Amino acid sequence: MERQIHIEPVTRIEGHGKITVFLDSAGDVRDAQFHVTELRGFEQFCVGRTMWEMPGLTARICGICPVSHILASAKACDAILAVRIPETAQLLRRLMNLAQLVQSHALSFFYLSAPDFLLGWDCDPATRNVVGLIAARPDLARKGIRLRAFGQEAIDRLGGKRIHPAWAVPGGVNQALSQEDRAWMTERLPEARTTIQETLALFKSAFGDTKERDVLGDYPSLYMGLVRQDGAWEHYEGVLRIVDAKGRVVREHNPAQYAEIIQEASEPWTYLKFPYYQPMGYPEGMYRVGPLGRINACDRFDTPLAQAELEEFRAQSGGRSGRVFDYHYARLIEILAAIEEMAELLADDRITSPAIRAEAGVNAREGVGVHEAPRGTLIHHYWVDQNGIIEKLNLIVSTGHNNLAMNRAIREIAKIYIKKGKVSEGILNRIEGGIRAYDPCLSCSVHAVGRMPLRVEIVNAQGEVEATLSRD
Amino acid sequence: MDLIVGIGNELRGDDGVGIRVVGALPPRPDAETIAVHQLTPELADRLRDAERVLFIDAHATDDTVRLSPLEPAAEAALLGHALSPEALLQWTRLVHGRAPEGWLLTVPARAFPFGESLSPEAECAVPEARRMALRWLGCSAPHGGVLEEDA
């Protein structure tokens, strides 16, 4: 008899995510599905708006990644204006994107994921959280807080408003960087760099044995990310590169022509689409984006400390890593790279120039904006009429790119930890941990109050609930 | 100083009703109001200096506007990125050594489509929620008669 195990971790209304594990008649895992409600209808909602509204409007999709959406949107609008934005605007947008990367990766690592593996996978869920972390490792937790706060404050100072900064605009940015804010960021970079280096050292000492990092599964896939023309790690522009599991370049493509190589499949059990690399078909064209996708896709970092870490990582992994757990490792290396590049940008006197915006009208009827959000490649594609009114748009968000990979991760973890129908909460923690490693942004929907506890239902082929497991 | 935090996504119908209520409150010298998409850990910095904090949020299953006291409390690790009001109070206490007195005002919410308009039920509840928030602001006693008067 086939059985289904449902894991429902959330929420108030639509359920941000639900996991169903399908067991075969022997009680072993046959398949797993991660159901997500996200972004449904947002594209339709934006039709009829002006392109000038789009950065501010799309920034309101999400309370966590407004900066990512505003930058991708502004880049799509730049293409519609057909302008080359001023050099300083380019530098400032890069600086903003790096600050976003620091704060978002710090949130993911210190607040959400570190409790899982630093406090123990089987630790009581009531204390396996950031509050438990601050009790057990107060020094690490406080440094993590300060690191995230640094990224947030840098965004605040650049954008003038931390949440939904209406700062990146079509043609550039609308506020120059003051010398005072430049000095503020510059002075705090050494502490941020020390924090991430200490955290990397701690992480490597705890998980230097690569077998420890197999806990969330290890499987081959394609990897995708922006790289510079010379193959170096990139986050704001460049070439869209896809590599195979060995790191061999499969394709390098103009990001504006993403639709030639990326297509989206739909499944009836989730609202989140499944992008895939079109030449390999669906689902064989599964690829991964985000921290691990980027550091697997690039040849190297252009900053020395991150490059040294990448060399060590690759030496340990025998090249590219397919371990889900290594998303955390990659996230820490990327924070270091971001801090190094921030230092370079802030040392450049062009960063405070007042020439920050190119003025133009609608010169193209279509524009694509692609950059690397913390969770992976973010694509905004707009079609407008002659007055700049949005006629159609397509958004491919980072969490979407990783949809196939997250489902695969859940299946792999479930196969390791669920056998003969035996399920324990510790096993479910690892499935959650597999999802958290990808740091999916499920905030694009409504937020949660009155959240539901974790619930596991075992349902047989007749639709009858055989057993229910709950956290409370 | 009191702090009022409206929570929600104004692009998702009634989810933004808490922010609508916050926007309807007149400015006061003894209170700060902020609107957020969701509660994130760094808000602890804003709570640190407040004597009291009132969170105003949508509630999908309740039929009436309710004001309830909150106690700091931990919550299990999340898949998403947002904290509950109780967890944010707890977080503030741990990071800063103290947390303000916490209250939660919930407003009935029914529809969450993409769009900036409220459902009739949520729209009708806004004046009552505003009135209760104003009374909360006027109540200086630590656990004064707000609940009793508005029950």
Image (spheres, rainbow, N blue to C red):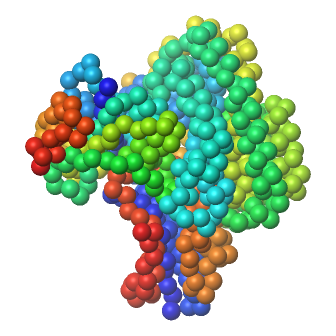
Q: Quadrant of the C terminus of chain A?
A: bottom left
Q: Residue at x 57, y 32 (%)?
A: A149
Residue in front for this viewpoint, A171 or A445 = A445
Residue in front for this viewpoint, A111 or A152 = A111
Query: Is B17 placed left or right of A379 in the picture?
Result: left
Residue in front for this viewpoint, B109 or A386 = B109
Query: Is A61 placed left or right of A417 in the picture?
Result: left
Residue A281, horizontal then vertical, whole percent:
65, 62
Residue A7, horizontal then vertical, whole percent:
48, 70
Residue A145 drawn above or below residue A323: above
Does residue A96 appear in the picture of this structure?
A: yes
Residue A314, horizontal then vertical, whole percent:
85, 50
Query: Is A412 placed left or right of A228 in the picture?
Result: left
Residue B44, horizontal then vertical, whole percent:
46, 36
Does residue A270 appear in the picture of this structure?
A: no
Q: Residue at x 64, y 58 (%)?
A: A119
